[in-house]
Amino acid sequence: MVKNILVVDDDTEDLKTIESVLKTEGYNTKTVKDGAKAIDSLKTYHKNTKQWLGKTELN
């Protein structure tokens, strides 16, 4: 079973790090830098995915 994860973060270095770790663990990843792009991605790329992992960062 393919495991897909959408990673959303406004920090490019954090995106690269998280993506690298997840790919090493066997996940397919898609990265975006803001909430609007995340919602668009959920409607297209991840529309058939039934499980989600979310993380929020409030500064």
Image: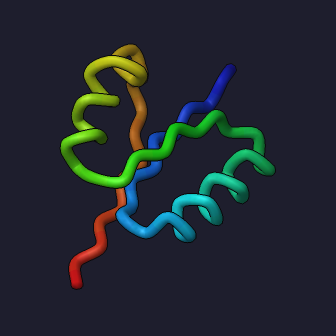
Answer with left or right where residue 34 lies relative to residue 17.
left
- The residue at 56%/69% (across/down) is 13
The one nearer the camera, 12 or 30, is 12
Residue 44 appears at what percent x and percent y? 33, 18
- The residue at 67%/51% (across/down) is 22
Residue 37 appears at what percent x and percent y? 27, 40
Residue 3, compared with residue 26, is above or below; it is above
Q: How many marks?
A: 0
Residue reaching furthest right?
24
Residue 47, compared with residue 27, is above or below; it is above
- The residue at 52%/38% (across/down) is 30
Residue 31 appears at what percent x and percent y? 48, 45
Residue 25, compared with residue 4, is above or below; it is below
Residue 59 appears at what percent x and percent y? 22, 85
For the N terminus, give its image quadrant: top right
Which image quadrant is residue 38 in? top left
Answer with left or right where residue 1 lies relative to residue 25.
left
The one nearer the camera, 11 or 59, is 11
- The residue at 50%/64% (across/down) is 12
